[in-house]
Image: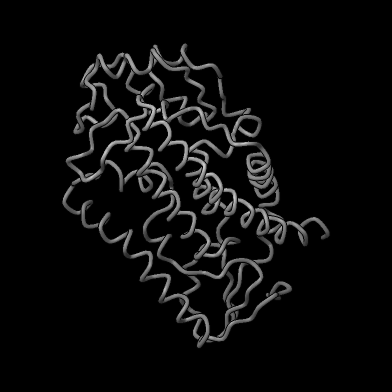
């Protein structure tokens, strides 16, 4: 098969150290998760990205350079990388994938661009997690191993004393029936592109989802960068939640207080800027892949 037009060709002496560096970076995330899983133990913060998103530890560990790069040398191992073509001593993303996945690429690009273009809404204070337990019995909680920091009545009081403005469908769909009616919006899967905005913590974490769904066009390093940010965001998401995680080493962000709200907004704004930078990198990947697919 003929390789695509390339911006880079890497000899094994160049790409092998990159692959080894990536593997060492990712092992810091995958190894603790796999060790816990072998003991049937769950971590309320660290395991979320593995359970909620569909990318496996093995896939995250797998290094690949992304679209437009031809690897040279002992490339037999890349036969195991989905979407890669190995031709003798060369390995590269199958050029035919660009046409076959053009519709998916356009949709993801449209969502990323629409989200990045909007001003960040910073007044939600992470109340989506509170709305997921509003008026729930203890056995109905999403994290039954964690106590509620303010207890059931105190948790419900926080929800009732705030305006719930969740824009993210995948968070909203987990609201309790009583909380659904309190949300000022009714986000659906169909109108995701119209609703998502860069201040939303779940939309920020989802940058990782779009990065791995764009594989193998996205490089393993870019996917890892998105995972790293999502991991930081999930910490804030749970620290600002109604759960008490002090026993796990996470002090609360008490969003029911003025100080907690200020802390949350500051972190929310910073994460939004960083997520937008990653969105722009992913848009660049989409454009690079779609250009030849569109012209062919």
Looking at the rendered image, the quarter that the C terminus falls into is bottom right
In this rendering, position of residue 101 left or right of residue 173: right
Estimate the x, y position of residue 45 in percent, counting from the top left: 30, 43
Quadrant location of residue 150?
top left
* Residue at the outermost right position: 295
Q: Position of residue 84 (x, y in %)?
A: 56, 68
The number of callouts visible is 0
Q: What residue sits 45% from the left and 43% below the top?
A: 267
The N terminus lies in quadrant:
bottom right
Pick whichever, 127 or 49, lies toward us.
Answer: 127
Q: Residue at position x 28%, y 16% from top?
A: 136
The figure's colour scheme reads one colour
Q: Position of residue 138 (x, y in %)?
A: 21, 20
Q: Is residue 265 visible?
A: yes
Which residue corresponds to the image point at 32% horizontal and 14% vertical from the top-left? 157
Q: Is 128 above or below relative to 4?
A: above
Which residue appears farthest toward the front when viewing the image? 259
Q: Is residue 22 left or right of residue 47?
A: right
Q: Is residue 268 left or right of residue 120?
A: left
Corner quadrant of residue 161: top left
Q: Residue at x 21, y 22 (%)?
A: 139
Residue 89 appears in the figure? no
Q: Picture coordinates of residue 173 (x, y %)?
A: 46, 25
- Is residue 11 depicted above or below 54 in this figure? below
Please tell me in which quadrant of the rendered image residue 219 appears: bottom right
């Amino acid at each position: 098969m003929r390789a695509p037009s390339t911006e880079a060709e890497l000899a094994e002496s160049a790409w092998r150290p990159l692959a080894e560096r990536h593997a060492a970076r990712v092992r810091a995330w995958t190894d603790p998760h796999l060790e816990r899983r072998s003991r049937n133990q769950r971590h309320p913060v660290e395991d979320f990205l593995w359970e909620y998103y569909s990318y496996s530890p093995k896939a995250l560990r797998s290094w690949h350079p992304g679209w437009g790069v031809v690897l040279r040398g002992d490339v037999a191992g890349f036969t195991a990388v989905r979407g890669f073509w190995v031709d003798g001593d060369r390995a590269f993303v199958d050029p035919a994938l660009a046409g076959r996945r053009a519709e998916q690429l356009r949709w993801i690009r449209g969502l990323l661009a629409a989200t990045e273009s909007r001003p960040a809404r910073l007044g939600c204070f992470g109340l989506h997690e509170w709305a997921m337990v509003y008026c729930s019995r203890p056995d109905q909680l999403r994290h039954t191993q964690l106590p509620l920091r303010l207890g059931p009545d105190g948790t419900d009081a926080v929800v009732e004393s705030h305006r719930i403005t969740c824009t993210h469908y995948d968070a909203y769909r987990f609201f309790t029936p009583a909380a659904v009616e309190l949300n000022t919006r009714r986000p659906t899967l169909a109108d995701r592109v119209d609703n998502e905005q860069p201040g939303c913590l779940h939309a920020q974490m989802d940058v990782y989802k779009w990065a791995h769904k764009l594989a193998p066009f996205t490089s393993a390093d870019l996917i890892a960068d998105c995972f790293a940010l999502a991991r930081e965001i999930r910490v804030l998401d749970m620290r600002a939640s109604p759960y008490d995680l002090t026993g796990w080493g996470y002090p609360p962000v008490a969003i029911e207080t003025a100080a907690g709200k200020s802390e949350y907004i500051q972190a929310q704004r910073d994460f939004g800027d960083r997520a937008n930078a990653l969105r722009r990198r992913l848009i660049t990947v989409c454009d690079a892949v779609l250009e030849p697919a569109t012209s062919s």
